[in-house]
Amino acid sequence: MSPLEAVARPLATRPQLRTAQGGALMAVAAMSSVQLGLALSVPLFAQLGAVGTAGLRLAWAGLLVLVLIRPRLRDFAGRDLLACTLLGLVTAGMVLLFMLSAARLPLGTASALEFLGPLAVSLLRPGGGRKHWAASAALGVVLLTEPWHGGINPAGLGFALGAAACWAGYILLTQRVGDRVTGLKGLAVSLPVAGVVATLVAAPSEFGHVTWPLVLVMLGLAALSTVLPYTLEFLALRRLTAGAFGTLMSLEPAIALVMGILVLGQIPGPAPAAGIILVVIAGAGATRTGGREAAADEGTAPEALPEREVREPVLCA
């Protein structure tokens, strides 16, 4: 058992955390960790640039999970290894595009636009109940972004929508990998792939400004905003349907606004405040209705899972 799995297993096997509500708690903790790390990363854009900040963070995160999990090639079937690699590519795109968006838009606005990806997952999955909560979340996103004010940065908007598309793919692929690959070994492949891709993108133009203090700061941010939340999301997606998880992610713009207030001094107006209430309601509804019929055991091999639970999350099924 890897060091990271040894830490995660006691958390994952607590009876009260093996339910849909436990998955929701893990998802909220993951979102809070991500948004705090992003808020702390914004001041670094002036030194490293958005791409450099994202690249260095993902490079550290990939190295950390390799050391902590130590995956072995024989632990993966060929198709599962491909899914892990695709997940890494999507993760790199999601982080890089969101960082580029956050450099041009307020953190809450960028996060709300990125949420359109999980919202699309919720709307397109079968089940009317999830659509009801997704509609509430959609109205909250409109209030959070306040499109009637106009003047939104076009490049920032485009990068945020690209991140939204990557986030939708990330949700579906994460659930597939989490169901098919035991423990956290899928994370130990996807994050290093994301780190390599982000490094190749960032190195030619941004890494010339890297200093040793920045390297150490980014190591801490990689643990806070990448390794910890992605581990929690893997565990959460074993307890929630992809649609419920996508709707629960509607809390992310609200958490981003809170972090923007506390860390960056970005004060929301009345409309964003109303949007927070709506997305919290949507998240609560997703928690009640989003439990999976059989949560995968972190120590259970994929073959032991019910066939329906293995096939349901597949992206192209």
Image (cartoon, rainbow, N blue to C red):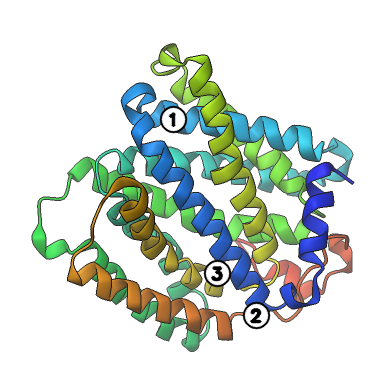
Q: Amino acid at mark 1?
A: Thr
**What residue does disc 2 label?**
291
In front: 57, or 156? 57
Is tag 3's residue or tag 1's residue first in the polypeptide sequence?
1
Residue at position x 23%, y 61% in the image: 268
Q: Which mark is residue 53?
A: 1
**For the residue labelled by badge 1, is the local secondary structure a helix, a strand or a loop?**
helix
**Residue 79 seen from this side:** no
Q: Is residue 54 left or right of residue 262?
A: right
Residue at coordinates 18% horizontally, 44% vertically from top-left?
154
Tag 3 secondary structure: helix
The kind of residue on which mark 2 rests is Gly
**Marks 2 and 3, Cα distance to the nearest angstrom?**
9 Å
Asked whether the residues under the numbered discs 1 and 2 touch, taking CB atoms below 8 Å apart as contact, a structural biologist would say no
Do the CB atoms of the residues marked 2 and 3 lie less than 8 Å apart? no
Callout 2: helix, strand or loop? loop
Q: Which residue is mark 3?
A: 245
Residue 144, given in percent of the width and then of the height, sits at 26, 65
Camera-side residue of 49 and 259: 259
x and y, in percent, of residue 176 in the image? 68, 59
Dots 3, 1 in contact, CB < 8 A: no
- The image quadrant where one finds the C terminus is bottom right
